[in-house]
Structures are given as structure tokens and as C-alpha cells.
Amino acid sequence: MHITFNPPLAQSTCIPAGSRNPLKLHFTATLHQQVDYRDFTTRGLKVQLWSDLIDPAWGAADFVPIPEHDPESSSLVTRDYTASGRFSLSLTLPASSGSRQFSFTYRVLHPSGQLEWLGEYGQNGTLLLEDGFYNLDNSWVPSGSGTSMKHEAGLQSSSEIAKVDSSYEVVGDSTEVLILVPNQASVVRTPILVFATTSVGSISVDANGTVSVSGDPSVEFTSCESIEELQDALVSAHTSFLPTADSIILGSATRAYILPTNLSPSPQEVRVAVRDLAAIAPTALPLCLYSEQHQFAKFFAADESVSFIVDPTGGSLTLVPMSRHSEAWHAGIVSPHYSSPTDTLPTPPPSPRLRPLTHRRPSNSPDPSFLDLSAPVAVPEFTPPKAVMRPRPNLLILLGYTILALGAWFVRLLFCLPRRPKALPAPPRSSRIPDEQTPLLSDSEPPTVLVVEPVLRANVPAGKISILFYGNETPFHVPIQLEGNNVDRNIHEMPGSFYLVEFSSKSGGMLIVG
């Protein structure tokens, strides 16, 4: 039976506790095999913490199972949280403890009362409480509530203004607002830290936790112990965000960051609407939600809800606008780029107007007045004819004509001879000579601009270029050009009818797909 723990045994784990009391600690245990988890639950076994955290004379506390996540949810976690079974334990360290160092080990309790110790003798784990999650220099002064501080302008270029614990990770890509959240390995749920410049300048943090500013900005700092304090700090920093039922969504030009509102060291399942992600970025539908780290992509042509499993630090997604170029596939540029307007063909000059003729010539064109239906038509009056006495035709001649007509009709019917219509004489050929009655062209209307069929095109910088294809056909034969030259591409097939096309560019330029 293989069980892993956080914090681990045989190691010293430093906790930036500061002056916060009481302090809430979180422990986790993970069973990585389905067989072990099934055997563990069937036999009624329990995982326990044995430590002087509970009682100075040592005591035990039981881990409880963490509910499994929806298997249909998309995973954005950075660790192997797809294990069959996970357990957690939360302890509150009272302010009266006074100690700064604690020891612990783990064990399995059987229904019979038998104890199975999981640590070796002398290999207990150790927790060391340190001073604070951050350290501000003496130039900071209180501002507003007790958790807010302000650093006035007047600093040297690239000046170091603060130091934060290495357990923090940066969320977002803004150079004016620095949002730091504790990573998922933290034993204690530390507050979220927000640094925001209030004047021209930028702010950054390095791998050692040193916070520096460039330029000469004023900076405001907030230690957010709750989601409400975080929202207030984001509003004060003029940062775009969107609160949902179980998360806060931060947006940038092409990315969305999902922070769970449940302050827990375990991964959280959050549900967000695609329209909210598109609005916060902002990006229009259809789009793809893409994570390069987890090789995850989902296509959305209409609004719907989607579930994600995210770390306590949240998860980030790249929002890729997709363009449809045929019945078979959609495509979108994942890499940073700048859109290029669709090219148009040059507008031809207007046609010249007809010139009026100075000499009258006979014209074969019909009289336009003949088509003028608005003119009244003169109808002659009808007068009854006068009675005229005509001589009666000879009866024999009339009878002969009748017999002759019937005979001709009988012969035609007998031999099925069709009647041939009399051909009309062809009209004489004549060239039409325009005269003053030929209408002149009116003033030319602005010509219609002919637009070339749109293709996916953008200006891309030098470096790695990634294009995401979605559809029923492979993009192996789709033309891709950079500055008019075909590129050598690498195509990676992904789950869900996705293909990721990648290539490198030394200088960047105009990219055309399709």
C-alpha cells in the first residue's frame, strides 16, 4: 500500500505563520492505486496523524475522505490529483501554544485496534513556524484597513520594496498589479497578497520572492485574508475581474485566470460560463479554451457551462478566437499576435460618360413615347353599321368548299402531317446608331470595393508559433505561410479532434493560414 503525505515525514517544513493566531493547518494523504483505495475502504481502515500539535503529550487525529470530482470536469491541476483516493485533515493551532516547533508522524488504524506506523524510528516530520508571509521595508505606511499599506513614490529605478515567502505564485500577467497566491503545497492557507501601482511604473517579483518596482510609482499593498478583501483590493487596483458562485475570474488580453473562492489547500471544482470567460478577456465566440501545460482544449460555438478542477492557486486558460475556413475545420492562433486587416483589391477608375452627338441621324431605336403608358389612348367611337343587302351565295359552291375542307383535314389526319407555321421574314440587319435620344450615363456611383475572401492572418513576433486546428479533417495540407514562404511545421494530434501546429520563426512577420 503506497500512501504519500503533505507535509512529508523525515523533513522539516517551514510555515510562515507570522502573528496570525489561531493558525489553521492542512494535512493531506493520497492513495495512488485503485486497488489500495478499494481495499482501504472495504476493510474500514483509517489514516491518522500522531503529533504534539494536538496535545503536548501527543495525540491522534483522523483524516477524512475528500469527495471525488466529476469525471467530466476538465483538469487544470499541476499535480497528480487524479489518484483514486485522497484524504485531508485540518487542525487549528491555538494562540496559547507558545511553541514554534512541532513533530508528527502518520499511522493506519485497523478496525481491530491494530496500529500500522508509516514512519521509521527517528524519521518524524517537523513543522517550524517562521515570521510572517511577507516582509515590508520601513518606507511602508498604513493605508485604510489594518491589512493595507502604501509605499510612496520617490524610489530609485528597479528598487526592492518587499520580500514574500517562496510558497507564493504569481497569478496574471499585468505589470501594474501583482497578485500572489499560496501554492497548493502550503500546509497553512496563507493570505493572498496584492501589490498595485497607483502611478506610472511597473512591479514584478523574482524566484526568490523579491518584489521590485521600475520607474517611480506609488504602490499599495493588501494582505487579503478573505475573498471579500480580495475583491475590494482588485476594485481599488482597477483590475478587471468577474465573481461567480465559486470562483473569481481575472482576465487579460488573451488569458483567463480562475481563482476558487473556497480557501482550501485541496483542488477545487468550479463551474463557469463560457460567456463570462469570453467577456472578461474579452474574446468573441466561437473560441477554444486551451491549456498548454495540460494539453487540454475545448471548442465552444455557443454559450454553455464548463467545469474545471483547479489548484488552490487557481488555473489559467488561453482563450483562442477560432475562425471557420471551410466545412471541415476551424483555426486560431495561440501565440501572441496582432490582427491584420483583410486586404482589398484596388478600386478601378470610373467609366467615362457618353458624349452627346451633334448631328441628327436616322435611328432604328424605337420611339420611347411608344412605351409611355401614362399617355391617354384615343379610342374611336363605335357606330352601328347600316344594314346592307348582299346577294345569297350559291348553295352548290358553298357545299363544294365544305367538302374540300373536310377532305383536306381527313388527309392530314390520316398521314399525321404536322402543320408547318409560315416562316416570318428575318428582320434586316442594321447597326444601331446612337443619337441624341440615347440616354447618357448618370453620374457614376461609388464603385463597390471587392474584398478578398478572408483568411486567418496576423503579425506574429519571433519565437515559437502555435496554431490550433479543430475539425474532422487533418490540417496536413492546409497552406501556412510566413512572410510569403511556406513553413516547416510540427503537427501534434490532441484528444477531441484537435491538432496543434507548431514552428519557430527567427524574425516573425505576416502569418497567413488557409
Image (cartoon, rainbow, N blue to C red):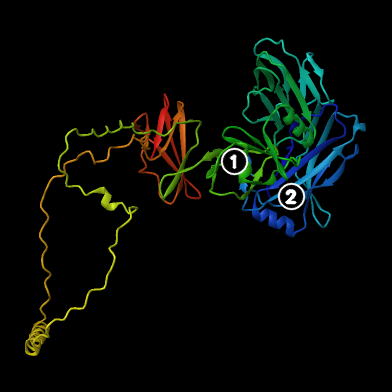
Label number found at residue 62: none
Give the mark toward the camera: 1 or 2: 1
Residue behind mark 1: 278
Provide residue 274's location: percent of width, then percent of height.
Answer: 61, 45
Q: Nearer the viewer, residue 183 or 400?
A: 400
Q: Nearer the viewer, residue 354 or 77?
A: 354
Is residue 348 shown left or right of residue 334?
left
The residue that appears at 69% across and 54% down in the rendered structure is 37
Of the two numbered discs 1 and 2 on the same chain, state the one appearing first in sequence. 2
The residue that appears at 29% across and 58% down in the rendered structure is 378
Residue behind mark 2: 66
Q: Quadrant of residue 489?
A: top left
Is residue 291 shown left or right of residue 206?
left
Q: Quadrant of the C terminus?
A: top left
Provide residue 255's location: percent of width, then percent of height.
Answer: 59, 35
Q: Callout 2: few (<14), some (14-19), or many (20+) C-alpha neighbours within 10 Å?
A: some
For label 2, the SS is: loop
How far is mark 1 from mark 2, CA to CA? 32 Å
Hey, what amino acid is under mark 1? Answer: Ala
Please say whether residue 52 is visible from this viewpoint.
Answer: no
Q: Callout 1: few (<14), some (14-19), or many (20+) C-alpha neighbours within 10 Å?
A: many
Q: Are marks 1 and 2 in contact (CB under 8 Å)?
A: no
Vertical placement of 444 versus 161: above or below?
A: below
For label 1, the SS is: helix
